[in-house]
Each structure stands twice: as C-alpha cells, then as structure tokens.
Amino acid sequence: MNTTENYIDVYSIITDRIIGQLEKNIVPWQKPWTQSGHPQNLLTKVPYRGINTWLLASLGYAQNYFLTWKQIKAVGGSVIKGEKGHVIVFWKKLEKDNPNSDQAPATVLRYYKVFNIAQCDHLPEVFNIPFPPHTISLIGACDEIIEQMPNRPVIKHSKSEAYYHPIEDYINIPKQSSFSSTESYYTILFHELIHSTGHASRLNRKEVVEMEKFGSDQYSIEELTAQIGACYLNSVAGIGDRDFENNVAYIQGWIKVLKNDKRFIVYASGQAQKATDYILNVQPYAKHGIQMAETMKIQ
C-alpha cells in the first residue's frame, strides 16, 4: 500500500478547499462560531479541533452540529437528496512492520465526511436543540482568558507597537485607549499571547525562535498560527474584530504560501490548537492537534 501518496493527497484536498475559500475572499479562520456554536459531533458532543474547526465553522450553518453517514442511519435519519458531505481529517496510526520494535508507529492523515443537521431529514426531535452560549468553554470575558493562562508572560504597555519578545519573554502592546475598538485591542493581545506559547518554558515551538527572519517559512507558519489562534480565542470570548486585516494583498499572500506547501495550513492549525489549549488551560481531547476523540469509531 502506497501510504505516502494517500497521505499527501489528503493534504491537497484540504489545502485546495481553503484556497478555494480564500479566492472567494472568505478567510476561514476569521469566521466566528459565536452564534452557531463551536462545530461538534451531534451524538458525542465532542468539539472538532484544529483544521476541522475552520473547515466546518466557515460553512455558514445556523447550528454547527454534524453527523457521519453511519450516525445518521443509526438514529433513523436520512440525508436530503442532493446534499453533499463535508471533509474532515484525522490521524490514523499504521501497524508496525515489526511488532517488537521500540519505534513509534507511523501516522498518516486520513479523511471522511460529515453532514450538518440542516442537511438531514427525520432526525429524532431530541436533537433539535439550540446551542448554549460558548459551548467550547465557560469563559466569557477576554480578561478572564488572559488571567487564567498558566505561566503567562509579562504584559507591558511601554511602547506604541505590539510584539512578543521571544528572548526576554514578554509582550508589549499599546494601551487599550490607542485602539479603535476594545475588540481590536484583545485580538492583537491574543495574537501575541499565541506567539508566547512557543517559548521554551511552554510549548517550545521551533518557529518562535525564527520569528525575526521575516518572510521565511518558519515566520509564515508562526504568523498564521498566531492569527488562527487569536481568532479561536475571539470566538471563545464571544467577540469579533471588525478591523481585522482582510484586504486583497493579505489574502493573496496566504494563497501563495498555501500553494507552495500543501501541509502548511494543517500544520499551522494544529499548532494554533495546541497554543489555545495551553492558554485556556484545558486538556486536549487527543494527542494530536487535529485528531478527534471519536476518530474511526463513529464513522
């Protein structure tokens, strides 16, 4: 079996989907789930994670509940004629060639499809329930998110620019009164907090060390990680940033990067998930940032 070919193909499927959205001026990681709820499986109530969050949240459904084909059939439901499933991904461990080897088993990226409840008929009425507010977390305030971050770096307001200093491990951000809105202030602060999770005393993310090399692959990965992570925290806090950069140059820049590296978006999303887990001080549902607790057993 040619696992390498299949592995790369899944990256291509996901990346092409994201590029397609960007070409329509839709930035998936900027789509909040505040009103529709964090995308989750209807039966298990387990939130989807990493890249799957953005793949599903950007679809624009009124309620972000999803089911696999087998789950729909199991509860007596059906898919509305003409509706198509949505791709999500998970990591699958391969069996070792030598069971006695101490080497960790290889993993490959796989995908399957899920359907939103709006695409289904004849679901039991018990499932027709609204999302409670902030289903992913009980945290409702930006300050609360910041205060409960473990091993939080020092936050200074001494200069008129926002940045994270990876060597001295501190964040500088202008005073809140300098921003056009409260949302903008917290979005930028969340962005820098995501950067800070890469410090050696936290998640030890290699890209943070390379942040000063503007334009490098490591710089681009770290920037996208921070942008995705900040948008994630915005949704958890229930805010949106209307001033968030969304111009043509910004979108075209990410399209170019993603076309050059099919693995880029999946990797950055996984790192952003780990970073937000760290800041929110929650235990991940699985080892890998884009793997889901239900994986194969609910298909």
Image (cartoon, rainbow, N blue to C red):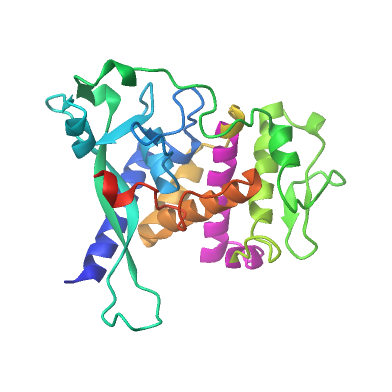
Tell me how many marks there are: 0
Please tell me which residue is depicted at 57% across the width and 53% down the height of the picture: 223
Name the one closer to the observer, 117 or 212: 117
Residue farthest front in this picture? 100
Residue farthest right in this picture? 158
Q: Position of residue 182 (x, y in %)?
A: 71, 27
- Range of magenta residues: 206-235
Please tell me which residue is depicted at 74% across the width and 31% down the height of the picture: 179
Look at the image and tell me in which quarter the C terminus lies. Answer: top left
Q: Position of residue 130 (x, y in %)?
A: 42, 18
Examine the structure image and report whether residue 88 is included in the region drawn in magenta. no
Residue 88 placement, left or right of 291 = left
User: What is the quadrant of residue 64 in the picture?
Assistant: top left
Q: Position of residue 27 (x, y in %)?
A: 44, 38
Please tell me which residue is depicted at 13% across the width and 27% down the height of the picture: 82
* Helix, strand or loop: magenta stretch: helix
Indicate whether 187 appears above or below 77: below
**Is residue 185 visible in this depiction of the protein?**
no
Residue farthest left in this picture? 81
Residue 73 placement, left or right of 169 = left
**Is residue 280 visible in this depiction of the protein?**
yes
Look at the image and tell me in which quarter the N terminus lies. Answer: bottom left
Q: Position of residue 214 (x, y in %)?
A: 61, 62
Please tell me which residue is depicted at 54% across the width and 27% down the height of the picture: 134
Name the one closer to the observer, 217 or 14: 14
Examine the structure image and report whether residue 231 is included in the region drawn in magenta. yes
